[in-house]
């Protein structure tokens, strides 16, 4: 007999018939001798409807009242599903998050789970009852017992948190597609089902826009090694397994807040090649990285920040022994860039051997803007200048001077409480077995890009900017500090660009503009008409050519790349929003991910 946690999303419980169908499925699993905890979402589009209703009453409703309102959606479903089970003769009881004891921080609309009390659940399970729990909601740990919600899509997180706390045998997420696909089948009908994916890959995909799983659910599954599977509510197909490496033992207390950073890495064996003032038009990155890949040179970080007039800079890092070769390729290409009709300024190649990469990583960084800011602050306080920054939701990498490497490592491990003896210096290929270079592609249309020009190139600047955003609770993704250097009033400056949720963009621009007056940066501009397109695959490590193929697919469609940022297992490009879906289709196709088997969406 197994203990199983199942979660059914909004579409799966969207009507009376669907609730009855779900009840039948649950009944069948229970009759096979399993104990069951079932987590449900609000019916259909209920949550969206409630949000609209609130917006008709208030332009900026309080987060507390929003939680009060939105949590009602799930409460309807648990009662109805429980009734449907009882109608089938299956003993069942519904419980709200507070009744279970899903204890969260008192942070309305984005609360993190601190712990899940299991006593009451176990009592009901022992009586042979199916326990139906309201997803997406919890109760604050404060004495007021506030109702909190976990953030949109958070029922997945409720389910995995319950499974981990109950030490369930597995957690099954039932939804309106047959599992995790190579991309969103609503946008690309040729998307194919995958039988499995690593938790690290899914974490990247989920935080880059693949909303089939809430990223925090993947984080908990990974941290506690919880077997997780995503499958269809209307078929018996096996779905997609999310596989985790064997986790380090971890307390269930402080579940989502205990350790935001679980690794500090340094890589001394890095050298930087930068192409400055190259023309900003489709095909330049494809051409450069195509040549690099022809020579089998594996690049690590690739960073392209915002354009400057009609030109741009691209910087990338390679291991030291490949520097000469990479430089030769860049030098060979730059004359053709200079003579191209779009050329506006002198393209130039610079190299630097004296660099190192220092990175912090951990899934707990998702949605916690203070972590990257803290890293920048630690480096700033130690007078360590950050030359380039590249971030993903789960990793922040900074290029610094090699001579500062040991100090940076020491300070960061101290700050984030990382035991260095358990860390490998370079976490190179930590993914055993065969993995495709690209597992999936995700498009995020809900981001905006903010650019700050002419930020003085001295320690502390990134720290001031991102600490301020963190204080205002604005989550930042894809921070890119460019290579380009402008000297203004004899002070060297660089541009910093990053992406934020569209809803935060105006506020972020406003507070940075205010800060600018104090720290002396140039213009701040926001652009909401962007899309972020990302390819993810554990097999891209040590597999030169993935970036080239990605950029070439965009170039072929004449799509200009506005920014590039990479981590070990993903490459993201910021492009014009109107070209998002076209780009997604082209890139999905270019990596051979499409198939002729069309999956059913929506049941
Ligand atoms: P639920 O209500 O069951 O939680 P969601 O709407 O949150 O369902 O998530 C399922 C949806 O995620 C699918 O209908 C699909 O459109 C979308 N999606 C985006 N990316 C992917 C992907 N890579 N694989 C599968 N579905 C995806
Ligand atoms: N009902 C909530 C939402 O729509 C939570 C969920 O479905 O996961 O965001
Ligand atoms: Mg969902």
Image (tube, rainbow, N blue to C red):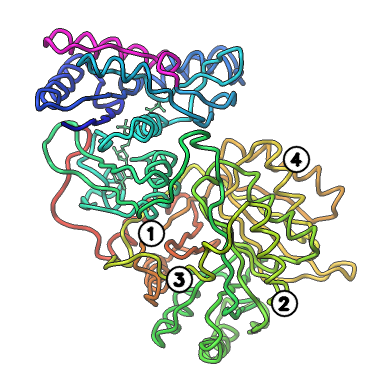
Residue 534, percent from left and from top:
42, 57
Give the residue at mark 3. Answer: 428
**Is the CB–ligand 1 distance for label 3 below 8 Å?**
no
> Is label 4 in contact with label 2 (beta carbons under 8 Å)?
no
Taking the spot 22% from the left edge, 58% from the top edge, the residue there is 594
Rendered-image quadrant of the N terminus: top left
Q: Residue 304, relative to residue 508: is it above or below?
A: below
Can residue 190 be seen here? The reply is no
Give the residue at mark 4. Answer: 511
> Is label 3 in contact with label 2 (beta carbons under 8 Å)?
no
Mark 2, other Cα within 10 Å: few <14 / some 14–19 / many ≥20 = few
Q: CA distance from mark 1 to mark 4?
A: 33 Å
Determine the main secondary structure of the stretch shown in magenta.
helix
The answer to which of marks 1 and 4 sits earlier in the sequence is: 4
Membership of 98 in magenta stretch: yes
Give the residue at mark 1. Answer: 536
The answer to whether 130 appears left or right of 447 in the picture is left
């Amino acid at each position: 007999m197994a203990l199983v946690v199942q979660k059914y999303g909004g579409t799966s419980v969207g009507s009376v018939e669907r609730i009855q169908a779900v009840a039948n499925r649950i009944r069948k699993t229970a009759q096979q001798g399993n104990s069951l905890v079932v987590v449900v979402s609000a019916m259909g589009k209920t949550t969206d409807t409630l949000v609209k209703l609130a917006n008709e009453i208030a332009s900026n409703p309080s987060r507390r009242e929003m939680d009060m309102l939105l949590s009602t959606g799930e409460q309807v479903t648990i009662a109805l599903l429980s009734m449907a089970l009882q109608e089938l003769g299956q003993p069942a009881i519904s419980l709200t998050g507070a009744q279970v004891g899903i204890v969260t921080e008192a942070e309305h609309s984005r609360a993190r789970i601190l712990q899940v009390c299991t006593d009451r659940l176990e009592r009901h399970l022992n009586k042979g009852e199916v326990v139906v729990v309201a997803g997406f909601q919890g109760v604050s740990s404060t004495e007021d017992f506030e109702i909190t919600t976990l953030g949109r899509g958070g029922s997945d997180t409720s389910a995995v948190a319950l499974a981990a706390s109950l030490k369930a045998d597995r957690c099954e997420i039932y939804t309106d597609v047959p599992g995790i696909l190579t991309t969103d089948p609503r946008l690309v009908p040729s998307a194919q089902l995958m039988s499995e994916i690593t938790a690290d890959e899914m974490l990247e995909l989920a935080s880059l826009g693949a909303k089939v799983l809430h990223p925090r659910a993947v984080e908990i599954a990974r941290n506690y090694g919880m077997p997780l599977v995503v499958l269809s509510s209307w078929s018996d197909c096996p779905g997609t397994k999310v596989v985790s490496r064997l986790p380090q033992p971890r307390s269930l207390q402080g579940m989502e807040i205990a350790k935001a950073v679980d690794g500090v890495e340094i890589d001394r064996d890095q050298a930087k090649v930068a192409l400055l003032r190259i023309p900003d038009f489709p095909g330049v990155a494809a051409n450069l990285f195509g040549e690099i890949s022809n020579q089998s040179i594996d690049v690590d970080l690739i960073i392209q920040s915002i354009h400057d007039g009609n030109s741009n800079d691209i910087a990338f890092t390679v291991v030291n022994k490949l520097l000469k070769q990479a430089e030769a390729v860049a030098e060979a290409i730059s004359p053709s860039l200079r003579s191209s009709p779009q050329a506006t300024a002198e393209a130039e190649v610079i190299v630097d051997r004296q660099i190192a990469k220092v990175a912090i990583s951990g899934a707990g960084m998702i949605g916690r803007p203070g972590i990257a800011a803290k890293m920048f602050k630690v480096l700033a306080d130690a007078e360590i200048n950050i030359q380039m920054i590249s971030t993903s939701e789960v990793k922040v990498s900074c290029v610094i001077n090699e001579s500062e490497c040991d100090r940076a490592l020491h300070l960061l491990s101290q700050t984030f409480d990382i035991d260095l003896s358990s860390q490998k210096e370079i976490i190179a290929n930590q993914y055993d077995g065969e993995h495709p270079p690209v597992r999936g592609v995700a498009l995020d249309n809900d981001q905006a890009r903010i650019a700050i020009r002419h930020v003085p190139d001295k320690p502390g600047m990134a720290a001031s900017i991102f600490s301020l955003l963190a204080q205002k609770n604005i989550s930042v993704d894809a921070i890119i500090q460019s290579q380009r250097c402008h000297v203004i009033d004899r002070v060297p400056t660089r541009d910093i660009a990053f992406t934020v949720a569209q809803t935060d963009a105006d506020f972020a621009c406003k507070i940075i503009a205010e800060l600018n007056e104090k720290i002396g940066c140039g213009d701040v501009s926001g652009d909401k008409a962007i899309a972020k397109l990302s390819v993810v695959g554990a097999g891209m490590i040590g597999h030169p050519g993935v970036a080239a193929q990605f950029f070439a697919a965009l170039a072929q469609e004449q799509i200009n790349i506005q920014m590039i940022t990479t981590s070990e297992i993903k490459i993201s490009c910021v492009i014009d929003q109107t070209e998002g879906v076209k780009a997604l289709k082209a890139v999905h196709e270019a990596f051979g991910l499409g198939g002729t088997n069309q999956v059913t969406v929506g049941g």
